[in-house]
Image (cartoon, rainbow, N blue to C red):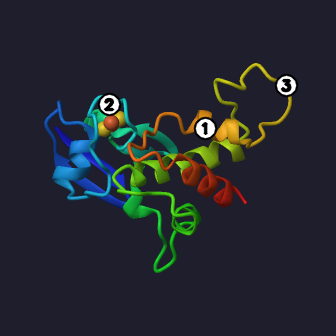
Amino acid sequence: MLTTIRVNGVDRAADVDTRTSLLDFLRERLDLKGTKKGCDHGQCGACTVLVNGVRINACLSLAVMHEGDEVVTVEGLAEAEALHPVQAAFLAEDAFQCGYCTPGQICSAVGLLSEIAAGQPSEATADLAGPVVLTDAEIRERMSGNICRCSAYPQILAAVRRAAG
Ligand code: FES
């Protein structure tokens, strides 16, 4: 099925098998290998990308469902020579070891900060009155879909805190 998806600011049209995941479309058709395949069934978060500004697991979504959508992968975050503030924060805090989960962690953190800016509560805070506050517990809750097998969680937490300012 002919599908056009705007990926990192560029319209990408391709004839796509309806069973192709967004993850495989990005990696295999567009050669954007920054988005990683870990579990391929929604458990690890390595494949996290932003779709219309919202973070999703690309392995759980079919490419043909994203006709006309705006997808941003880790390759699309930096502007010219400048890293995205979340990328810079991960670098400053050494928030990785093997680095395999890092693109997903970074895209997830970008989505998290957008959620906070928009005042969206997490499941854990949905019943609480008052503004959403970015506590460490809130960061842990919102990043809980992104697994790091090396356990760099303290540094990842520090990086998200740093990026949040
Ligand atoms: Fe998509 Fe693990 S590869 S969640």
Q: Earlier in the sequence, mark 2 or mark 3?
A: 2
For badge 3, the amino acid type reads: Ala
Ligand 1 contact, mark 2 (Cβ < 8 Å): yes
How far is the residue under mark 2 from the one under mark 3? 33 Å
- Residue occupying the point 51% across, 67% down: 91
Residue identifier under label 3: 129
**How far from the left and from the top, in percent, is residue 104?**
41, 48
Q: Compute the Cα span from label 1 to label 3.
A: 20 Å
Would you name the residue on which mark 2 appears?
60
Q: Residue furthest right?
A: 130
The residue labelled by disc 1 is 140
At x 16%, y 51%, the residue is 28
Instruction: Give the mark, 2 or 1, whose residue is nearer the N terminus.
Output: 2
Question: Helix or strand or loop: what does disc 2 sit on?
Answer: helix
Horizontal side of 19 relative to 138 (left or right) equals: left
**Numbered disc 3: secondary structure:** loop
Quadrant containing ligand 1: top left
Measured Cα–Cα span from mark 2 to mark 1 = 22 Å
Q: Quick one: label 1 or label 3, which is nearer the N terminus?
A: 3
Q: Check contact, mark 2 vs mark 1: CB within 8 A.
A: no
